[in-house]
Image (cartoon, rainbow, N blue to C red):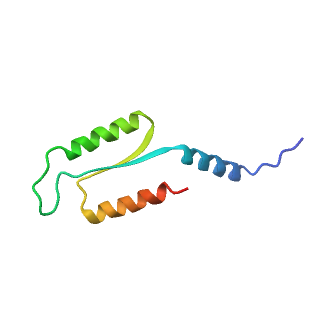
Amino acid sequence: MPRDINLTFIDSYLIDIIEMSMKKALVIGNDYHENFQPLQSCVNDANDVYDALNAIGFHALRETNIPMKDMKAVTKEFIQCIQP
C-alpha cells in the first residue's frame, strides 16, 4: 500500500516537539560594569553555572563581560527563543 507522507511536515513537527522539550538557559556573567569597580569572579561563576547546566541536559547560552545594551539584546533574543 503506497504511503503519501509529507516528510517536510513530519520533520518540522518533530523538530518543534524536540525544541519544546529542550531545557534552555541564559547565563550572563560580568566582571566589569560601567562606573563600578571590577568584580572578582562573576565570569568564573557564570562559566561554572553554564557547565553545570549543560551537564544536566540544558541547552545553555553563555555571555560574559557584555555591555548593558548587548545584555538587553541577548535577553530579548533568548525570550523569543523560549516562546512556544
Q: Is residue 3 left or right of residue 64?
A: right
Quarter of image, res 65: bottom left
In the picture, measured across the screen, residue 11 lies left or right of residue 63, that is right
Q: Nearer the viewer, residue 71 or 15?
A: 71
- In the rendered image, the residue lying farthest to the left is 37
Q: Residue at x 17, y 58 (%)?
A: 33
Which residue is depicted at the point 12% across and 53% down? Answer: 38
Q: Is residue 81 left or right of residue 31?
A: right
Q: Is residue 57 above or below residue 74?
A: above
> 74 above or below 54?
below
Q: Residue furthest top?
A: 55
Image quadrant containing the N terminus: top right
- Where is residue 66? Give x, y as percent: 25, 57
| Left or right: where 3 falls relative to 72 | right
| Quadrant the C terminus occupies | bottom right
| Residue 45 at x, y percent in the picture | 24, 41
